[in-house]
Image: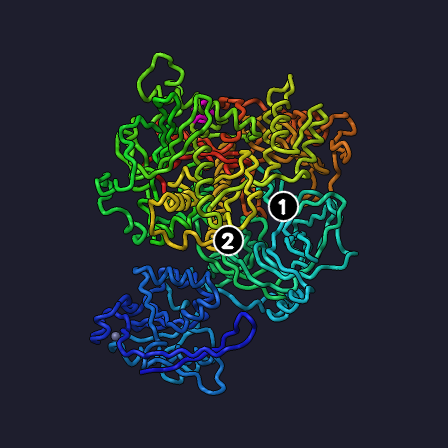
Amino acid sequence: MLQSRSHVRKTRKGSVIKVVRELYLREDIGCGVGVCADAVCASGVRTMQALPANANKRHAMPHIIVPDTNMFLHQMDLLEHKAFSDVVVLQTALDEVRHRSTQMYARLRAITADVDKRFYVFSNEFMRDTFVKRVKDESPNDRNDRAIREACRWYAKHLPSGISVVLISDDADNRRKATADGMFAYSVREYVEGLTAFPELVDMIAVNDDADDAAAKKISYPDHLTPSQITAGLKSGAFCQGTLGISFHNFLEGSIYTKVDGEDTSVKIIGRTHLNRGVHGDVVAVRILPKSEWLRQGDNVVLDAEEDDETLEKVDPNSLLDASAAAVPVPEQDDEMQTEETEQRAAKSGDWVRTGCIVGIIQRKWRPFCGTIEAPKDVSSDSGSSSQQKFVFFWPMDKRIPKIKIRTRQAKQLAGQRIMVAIDSWGKQSLYPMGHFVKALGNVGDRKTETDVILLEHDVRFMPFSKQVMSYLPDEGEAWVVKEEHLAGRMDFRHLDVCSIDPPGCTDIDDALHARLLPNGNYEVGVHIADVSHFVKPGNAMDQEAATRGTTVYLVDRRIDMLPSLLGTNLCSLRSNVERLSFSCIWEVTPDADIIDVKYSKSVIRSRASLTYDAAQARLDDPTLTDPVSTGIKLLNSIAKKLRAKRMANGALVLASPEVRFSLDNDAQDPLDVELKEMKDTNALVEEFMLLANIYVAKKIYSVFPDSSMLRRHPKPSATNFESLIKAAAEYGIEIDPSNNRTLSDSLDKAVLADEPYFNKLIRIMTTRCMMQAVYFCSGTLAPEDFWHYGLATDIYTHFTSPIRRYADLVVHRLLAACIGYDKTYSSDLVDKVKASELSDVLNFRHRNAQQASRSSVELFTNLFFKNKVIQEEGFVIRVMKNGFSVIIPRFGIEGIVHSQAAGPKGSTDNAQLLTHDAVANTLTCPTTGAQIRIFGKVIVRVSVEEAGQEAAQRSKLVVKLIEPRVPGLSVDPVEVQKVKVDVVPAVVDIPGVGKVKTNVGETNRVTAEMGVVSGDAVETKAGSTGGKGAGKKKGGKK
Ligand SMILES: [Zn+2]
């Protein structure tokens, strides 16, 4: 039977055309219910069973569920809950969800793919008995509602007796019509209240009204404009659009980065009314305010943290820091690391900064948030009546997100727990957004719970790999071996004395090396990288999962792999004495380390030895060893040193970051010790060759695919980034010259104070913070002069050497395989400029998140380490502010803020300042004793951990207090020094080494985590993301 469906479509030029689609309506679509005896159904997919009798008190008969479109759009948290199964997903609803929300569509697709959920997609639009034609004067919405009812009617008639069909819809009119036709129809609340086995479900119902708030309070935000009004305003230039970013230090201050009159600029949005219900991350439309309301750059506008009043505005322009930011360890200060955007935003002080107000929301970017609820104030009234839902406030961990009002009947049980909450709506008469409970994660302060929170907050996918992903692993499993059939097109390097050098306990070995003397007196050097692309084919489920994860994530006590461990730690891992597939770069170099030839080839190797850095160092240091592996290492080392000298002469930077590692208790994995990391000669050796491989592969892929190569660049930082550092160093007679990387590198080498050995490292740490982040990009989107990698001083760069744990490298392997003709059938997607560019964005996002998650993990362990300890330590001032200063404590690699005001009422920001700020000299001085705080000055501080209140979502935080110099009213008493075992290794880590040093789990059970603001992203290395490599491998990996 043929049906024609038509719809109108707007062409790119703006004319409207009618699209008519012929539709063949079928009769052979099954109902999807397992017990159905119908011949058509029996031969089709049967995912549903029907919910048993008494599963729902409201509807005690066995039944299947048919939700309407809105339920899929708004109640996905419920549908994902285990209480919901045997659900018919009508095509009508599925199509509409796909058009209206990509996010919800993806979640719905994930449910329908999960066989245990027993969701069934019913193609009602293609079926003769359920197809519904739109009648005259019927709105598309009404037509769809009718189609849904029609499908319900068909099911009711079709299903074996004893199984009923339940329509769930919050549309009263739809329910009324269904009931009038003799069908069962319930609202979401009615149905969920019947699921008495899962009382928490009631809390998970999304609320889309906020009438409760409106009556009590006389608040009203300005109306949001409609999409068409916004579009018109953007077109006419009346509005501008951008992604709202809220300040870490002040949740009532936001900004967007946008174009105004053709000029890239940032627009600040200050205060509740102007923010007008915009949430961090939303894409918003903004109207610029008149110039009389603009701000001067450098004006401090900080709003009070106390926000229980009902007014929309409360501005306290006097303070630089908000009251809750007492002390933060280094990792938290993500905003210290300048991204490219912030650099461009940076304006000279004194410049005018535009301000604006949000007139409409273009796209909400709400995600589920982790946090805690405000403890119920009236505990007695809560007891006994737990069936009663009450409003409580939820405080998100992310300080940029406003508190959220939720309705719950579990307030008492949830107090003291980490929970997850989703925002549902934010009406104009509601001071705060409304949301619903999603799930409980565990107790506040519990290490496992807090780690889950870190992963969730950074959007790290940490669930086990699905069956579908695992199905793409080789059938032989661990028994897989290199066979003759794999060798076609590969160089056979099994005779070469290849070895790998990694931290102890490293199981995912993705690189190995060799070097040998050639008959002509030159040397051959080979870098062999795990051939991951042999196992991960483009587009399959495993590839898609890896692309989504983007990178392996290293936490202090856990590693979240990008690929299943069978590949990562076995089949791809270049272990010793097993044959492994690899992708090799082979150079011929002169004795002066001039490169005269390079070859790229897929290969097969058999590593002779998997060495630790220490073991390799020992071979290097022992002149008596002449075995092939030792000789090779010595050769590699001498070539590496020459290559490195050339790179340095070229202006490559030597930076630093305070890096620490934790010693974990064997069983509880509680941190026992923390110490700074160390860098060995052999680390530098390996890194030198990885840099070489990455640079050469970048050149190669770019030469063949100039428009679509995945490259990596590190932009030059803006001169303004260095202003305060230059000024502070000048006070000590030190000149920092950031004109170019060569001058910067030279001036850093000269930045030495005879009486302060830590000074040079301090300067390098602060220089690192002036840097931009390195990013992936598609070569076709930028001019070649923008490919520049500032930190490494190279024209072109990419990531090739870590395909086990970085997806970018896997893509680069595919590109290189296509370049050298090994892969002649590569997909056009691989060289699609638009797709490559989108993928770069995703990978940059994933890498940033992974780094922030690592830092948060270090922060968590730092806090655990300091728990119940009060430690006195030496620190250096690295930033001076109007009402406080920050101190870096080298021994622990942490940073804290000391407030310089007298203690006063909680939340108060206008207590007496105990130090006088001199803005010109950038110092703080004690008026009575004359003691002075200035950048690079040495101070003695007390470090402890305090439990924060609910406003800070009950995060424990490091508190740093001043001991010396003595400032009456501010300084605290010295503490008896606790003996903490720490090996201080004051190593200056050079640029390649700024990335994380591979960890020492394994026999010593030490885990490394990077502490610094710097990460492998600012500065590149082979070890760029190896921090904590091997972490979590203990006891089979704590996944
Ligand atoms: Zn059937």
The quadrant of the image that shows the N terminus is bottom left
Mark 2, other Cα within 10 Å: few <14 / some 14–19 / many ≥20: many
Where is mark 1, residue-wise?
A: 342
Q: Is residue 228 visible?
A: yes
Place of residue 154 in the rendered image (x, y in percent of width and height, measured from the top left): 32, 80
Above or below, 59 against 349 in this view is below
Q: Splitting the image into 4 quarters, where does residue 127 fall?
A: bottom left
Q: Which mark is residue 513?
A: none
The quadrant of the image that shows the C terminus is top left
What residue is at 79 percent from the left and 56 percent from the top?
292
The main secondary structure of the magenta stretch is: helix
Q: Which residues are magenta?
A: 679-685
Ligand 1: quadrant of the figure:
bottom left
Where is mark 2, residue-wise?
A: 369
Q: Nearer the viewer, mark 1 or mark 2?
A: 1
Query: Any atom of ligand 1 within 8 Å of the CB at mark 2?
Result: no
Mark 1, other Cα within 10 Å: few <14 / some 14–19 / many ≥20: some
